[in-house]
Image: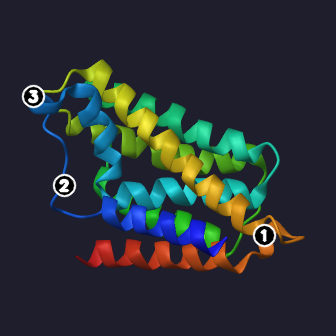
Amino acid sequence: MFRHFTIAAATLLAGAAPAFAHLDPEAHGSLLAGLSHPVFGLDHVLAMVAVGLWAAQMGGRAVFVVPAAFVGTMALGFALGLGGMALPFVEPGILASVVVLGLLVAVAARLPVPASAAVVGAFALLHGHAHAGELGIAGAFQFGLGFLVATAFLHMAGVGLGLGQSAGSANRSASSLSRVAGLGTALAGLALMAG
């Protein structure tokens, strides 16, 4: 259990390394640029893994519905951004998503699945819109497909961490490791806001 958590944590920290930044679509192609985009942004990684952790804490249908709501609504946000529709507070909202999602994991909040999907969906709309603003010269379809796939994998990493470390626990929501990860996520979000 600890070994898997350590590997995942090292992967997430490596993903935040500034030396890698985002891949250039001209050099690497639009799909690879899209795949790399959420993985090399600490705010995106933290929020997306937190979605998976929270879904794992809730269990049942939430394990699939909550991450799917994020991915689907993020695609909508991307489309709105491509269409030129402005959304207020995109960047502050993304940073707030890190703090709020981290706190939801830290307190193991239990909301009805539709309400949980609505919460993550509201933040996902902003994440998707931000991706549209960072499209640059990349092809929209390939770039969009890439970041949606990367997002799904980050959610799966969070779900895997949450379910893996709680497998030995009779009560998923009582898992201290997920709660600590949630608190760390919220604190990192506050640090990003201050920076």
Residue with the mark numbered 1: 173
Residue with the mark numbered 3: 26
Of all residues, the one furthest to the front in this rendering is 3
The image quadrant where one finds the C terminus is: bottom left
Q: Distance between the residues labelled 2 and 3?
A: 16 Å
Q: In which quarter of the image is residue 3?
A: bottom right
Q: Residue at x 71, y 70 (%)?
A: 108
The one nearer the camera, 71 or 100, is: 71
Number of numbered discs: 3
In the rendered structure, which amino acid carries the disc numbered 3?
Glu
Q: Which of marks 2 and 3 is nearer the N terminus?
A: 2
Could you say where residue 80 lies in the image, as x and y percent from the top left?
35, 28
In the rendered structure, which amino acid carries the disc numbered 2?
Phe
The image quadrant where one finds the N terminus is: bottom right
Q: Residues within 10 Å of mark 2 (few under 14, many from 20)?
A: few
Q: Distance between the residues labelled 1 and 2?
A: 35 Å
